[in-house]
Image (tube, helix red, strand yellow):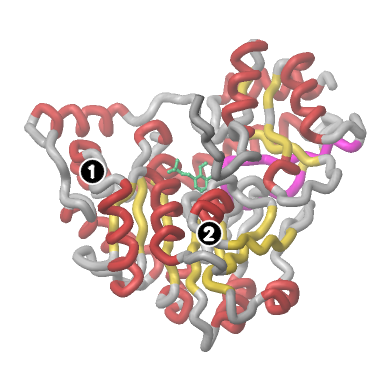
Amino acid sequence: MLNIKSKRPRSGTTIFSVMSALAKETGAINLSQGFPDFPIDGKLIELVNRHMKGGQNQYAPSAGVFELRERLSDKIRESYSHKYLPEDEITITAGATQAIYTAITAIIREGDEVIVFDPAYDCYVPAIEYNGGIPIHIRMNGPEFRINWSEVKKVVGQRTRMIILNTPHNPSGSVLTAEDMLQLQKITDSTEIIILSDEVYEHLIFDQLEHQSVIRYPKLAARSFVIFSFGKTFHITGWKIGYCVAPGNLTEEFRKAHQFLVFSVNTPIQHALCEYLNDRKNYLQLGEFYQSKRDFFRSNLQSSRFKLLPCRGTYFQTVDYSAISNEPDTEFVKRLTVDHKVAGIPISVFYKKPESNNFIRFCFAKDEDTLKRATDKLNLI
Ligand SMILES: Cc1ncc(COP(=O)(O)O)c(C=O)c1O
């Protein structure tokens, strides 16, 4: 037997896989993992078919199909008034996850410190650690989950190489404000710190709030990898396709790693998305679409014993269950799944040092019937 010394001995299966498997095994409604359960637009499927039949079945250029990068350059300029060059500043990736891993691999060396805000999406820390980096965790606490910038100021030092942001934020549904961005700008000014801004939920923002992309702030954009996911925007999480935009000097380093991680991303889907993006309605209506799901889910739970936390973006609703139980959240979600047939995600698993809290997250990217059946069950608890 080989003696394999694991590089991550304590890394288990992600909570998303664990809870989805438990939901399947127990026949529970799965509001745990973040994926839609409704059909995607048939037009998009037709476009992929057409490009497959038309012969777009071989390797795409490593940076991505040029026309798609051109279209994305326009889309970003229209949204955030900043132009990224399709030639040197936009790269198509196999989902946001690959883009995040690639950006971290391109920059982080042994001993570099990377600031992450807990609760943090689960792929950041492993990517930092595989590259010898040191995650520096800063807590955001519920119910508001705001960043405490004076704490950030205290931990920034010579070894800080990167700060990872995520807005709108998974798992809390909070969003960063213009004031947050100005604070970040102040802290990073005249440093060599690089920002990785995970903005996969850019279009899922509610109540007329404006998404505060780092791209809107030229000084921040100049030091940022900004990462997006078509999976979230077009309900196609299983297609695993996204993109990273960054100034030329950062993109150059990104592409050095990208070419050896995947080389390129599947061709017919890139051509299909390029055409699909021509109709702006396909993404500009997304906020409204998910806001009505959020409102439906929240109003159905209004008289339940779950306390609803603010949800300003993403398709996640976090709830406080302290009126129901004082079990740890990891136990409570399991019992909820097994006994009450609704699966969620415990928030504590997104922290380095989980403290007891009473928060769990539900995904409302589901059709109305699923949400109704789930909330009927939750109302009985
Ligand atoms: C905050 C955040 N970043 C990145 C990802 C990964 O996106 P993709 O499926 O495109 O890799 C997710 C998926 O849930 C996410 O919630």
On residue 101, which mark appears? none
**Among numbered discs 2 and 1, the one appearing first in the sequence:** 2
User: Which secondary structure dominates the residues rendered in magenta?
Assistant: loop
Classify mark 1: residues with Cα within 10 Å, few (<14), some (14-19) or many (20+). many
Instruction: Please name the amino acid that badge 1 sits on.
Output: Gln
**Residue 191 part of the magenta-drawn span:** no
The residue located at (17%, 55%) in the rendering is: 66
Give residue 202's position: percent from left, percent from top: 48, 54
Q: Which residue is drawn at 53% across and 84% down?
A: 191
Image-quadrant location for residue 330: top right
**CB of mark 1 near ligand 1 (< 8 Å):** no
Disc tally is: 2
Relative horizontal placement of residue 354, taking residue 128 as reference (left or right):
right
Is any atom of residue 58 visible in this view?
yes
Q: What stretch is highlighted in magenta?
A: 309-322
Q: Residue 270 carries which label?
A: 1
Q: Are marks 2 and 1 in contact (CB under 8 Å)?
A: no
User: Depth check: 199 or 212 in front?
Assistant: 199
Q: Can you say whether 59 is above or below 344 in the image?
A: below
Q: Taking 284 as reference, is 84 above or below it?
A: below
Label 1 sits on a secondary structure element that is helix
Residue 28: where, in percent of width, then height? 66, 16
**Is 49 left or right of 355, judged from the image as shown?**
left
Vertical side of 315 occupied by 301: above or below: above
Please name the residue that numbered disc 2 is placed on.
Answer: 132
Query: Closer to the camera, 285 or 90?
Result: 90
Neighbourhood count class around disc 2 (C-alpha, 10 Å): few under 14, some 14–19, many 20 upward:
some
Residue 69 position within the rendered picture, expressed as x and y whole percent measured from the top left: 23, 57
